[in-house]
Image (cartoon, rainbow, N blue to C red):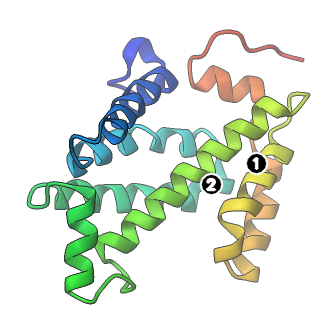
Amino acid sequence: MAGTDNGKPLAKISELFKELAATVNSEAADVELAAFSRACSHVSPLFGCLGIAFKFAEMDYVAKVDDLAEASKSILTLQSVIDRDIEGNCVRKAGSHTRNLLRVKRGLDMVRVLFEQILAAEGNSLKDPASKAYAQVFAPHHGWAIRKAVAAGMYALPTRAQLLRKLNEDGYSDE
């Protein structure tokens, strides 16, 4: 998790997404693809901290963010990405930038819902928060075999305290 402020990836992620939110709320400009992909790249270590249950999600998310980062060399904004794919009639095609943008959005939604569930949950287990987040975000898009594999992997999740330690966060407790 190198490159994060004081080794605290959550603080860096928060900072980068607050900058994006300021752009969205300013009405002055479209969100730059480079800034978006840079912010998203800092989220990928969170999947890695969750272990084998989310290994496929991590690999898929990283590949999609890398594609958007590469696209940002020639495409300036998120809106331009979508407009180009609409013009090229390839929005729904595997590997299109727009489809990759959708997959990245789902990854971000997964992390958001997971942390909402962690904050709402009691105890030290991540199984219920992660299961609820997966069911809400990814399960509707996965077939039976993938859903079953993820369910089996939920038993290998770190505890809440272990996750916070991996993220170098203060204030965790070993309940």
Q: Which residue is mark 1?
A: 130
Is 127 above or below relative to 123? below
Q: Residues within 10 Å of mark 2 (few under 14, many from 20)?
A: many
Q: Position of residue 104 (x, y in %)?
A: 44, 58
Name the amino acid type tagged 1.
Answer: Ala
Task: Report the front residue among 41 and 151.
Answer: 41
Residue in front for this viewpoint, 62 or 51: 62
Q: Disc 2 designates what residue?
A: 54
Please indicate whether residue 112 sits to the left or right of residue 20 in the image.
Answer: right
Does residue 36 appear in the picture of this structure? yes
Q: Secondary structure at mark 1?
A: helix
> Pointers 2 and 1 in contact (CB under 8 A)?
yes
| 8 with respect to 37 (left or right) | right
* Amino acid type at image mark 2: Phe
Q: Is residue 140 left or right of residue 175?
A: left
Cα–Cα gap, marks 2 and 1: 10 Å
